[in-house]
């Protein structure tokens, strides 16, 4: 079966891994996601994954003014490393070979990120899970996703979220919010839409990497986007 994108970077939020539990993991859901990623890899897709850490720690938001920003962000990086290990282990149980690469040195958790090595893994059919964001405070995991996508020369960023696309306003607060089927990077930045942060959006725009925003919880959503179905919102 044909795929629309050969090499993709999938961004999964930590909150999405918790599903309705809000914190920790919903392992039935995590297993379904990993199994779906395995099906994508079986079709010949080369898959990198950047995972957030919000199911454990949301950086400065959870610091509550009690923890300095740099420390809060580094705690968030460690939370993503926990999620990387969980994803890699569940993928192994699904028969998917994965490698964890981290932006900071954490012996025993994963290899230190190296672009050339990451591409070698991708070309050999392994899923590469990128942890610890960019390795620097003040940069979100959205920015890490855009950065890694540019470095590995991804054909697209698949932004798997808890919402089914890009809206003109928060649909949970404004029932009149309009969903976009397609929108430009410039419009996202001008309207300050909550797709990715401005740094991540600018990085994707500068490197001409399309971003597909869709709901992770929707049935077979990653697979359907990979096969070219018009699901969610296309940002380009």
Image: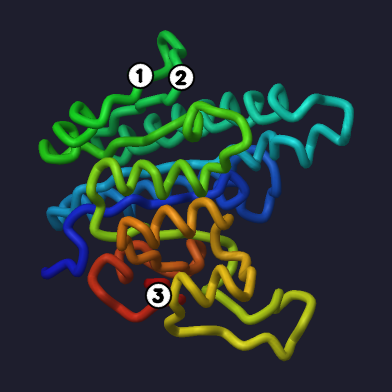
Mark 1 Cα shell of 10 Å, populated few (<14), some (14-19), many (≥20):
some
SS type, badge 2: loop
Which disc number belongs to residue 104?
Answer: 2
Q: Earlier in the sequence, mark 1 or mark 2?
A: 2
Task: Say which residue appears at 68% left-offset and 86% top-offset.
Answer: 177
Q: Secondary structure at mark 3?
A: strand
Q: Position of residue 151 (x, y in %)?
A: 28, 41
Residue 31 is left or right of residue 63, and the answer is left
Quarter of the picture containing the C terminus is: bottom left
Disc 2 residue crowd, few under 14, some 14–19, many 20+, Cα 10 Å:
some
Question: Looking at the rendering, in which quadrant would you find the N terminus?
Answer: bottom left
| Picture quadrant where residue 170 is located | bottom right
Relative to 59, does residue 31 appear above or below in the rendering? below
Marks 3/1: CA–CA distance: 32 Å
Circle 1 residue: 112
Mark 1 in CB contact with mark 2 (< 8 angstroms) = yes
Q: Is residue 14 above or below residue 202?
A: above
Q: Which residue is mark 3?
A: 234
Q: In which quadrant of the rendered view does residue 172 lie? A: bottom right
């Amino acid at each position: 079966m044909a795929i629309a994108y050969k090499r993709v970077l999938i961004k999964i939020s930590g909150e999405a891994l918790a599903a309705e539990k809000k914190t920790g993991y919903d392992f039935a859901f995590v297993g379904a996601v990993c199994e779906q990623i395995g099906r994508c890899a079986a079709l010949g897709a080369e898959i990198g994954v950047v995972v957030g850490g919000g199911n454990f720690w949301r950086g400065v938001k959870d610091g509550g003014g009690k923890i300095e920003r740099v420390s809060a962000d580094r705690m968030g990086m460690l939370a993503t490393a926990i999620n990387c290990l969980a994803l890699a282990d569940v993928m192994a149980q699904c028969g998917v070979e994965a490698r964890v690469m981290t932006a900071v040195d954490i012996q025993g958790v994963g290899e230190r990120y190296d672009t050339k090595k990451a591409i070698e893994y991708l070309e050999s059919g392994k899923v590469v899970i990128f942890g610890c964001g960019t390795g620097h405070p003040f940069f979100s995991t959205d920015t890490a996703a855009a950065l890694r996508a540019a470095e590995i020369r991804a054909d697209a960023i698949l932004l798997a979220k808890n919402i089914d696309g890009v809206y003109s306003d928060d649909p949970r607060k404004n029932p009149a919010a309009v969903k976009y089927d397609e929108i430009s990077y410039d419009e996202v930045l001008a309207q300050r839409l909550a797709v990715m942060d401005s740094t991540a959006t600018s990085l994707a725009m500068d490197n001409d990497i399309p971003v597909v925003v869709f709901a992770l919880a929707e049935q077979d959503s990653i697979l359907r986007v990979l096969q070219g179905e018009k699901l969610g919102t296309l940002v380009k």
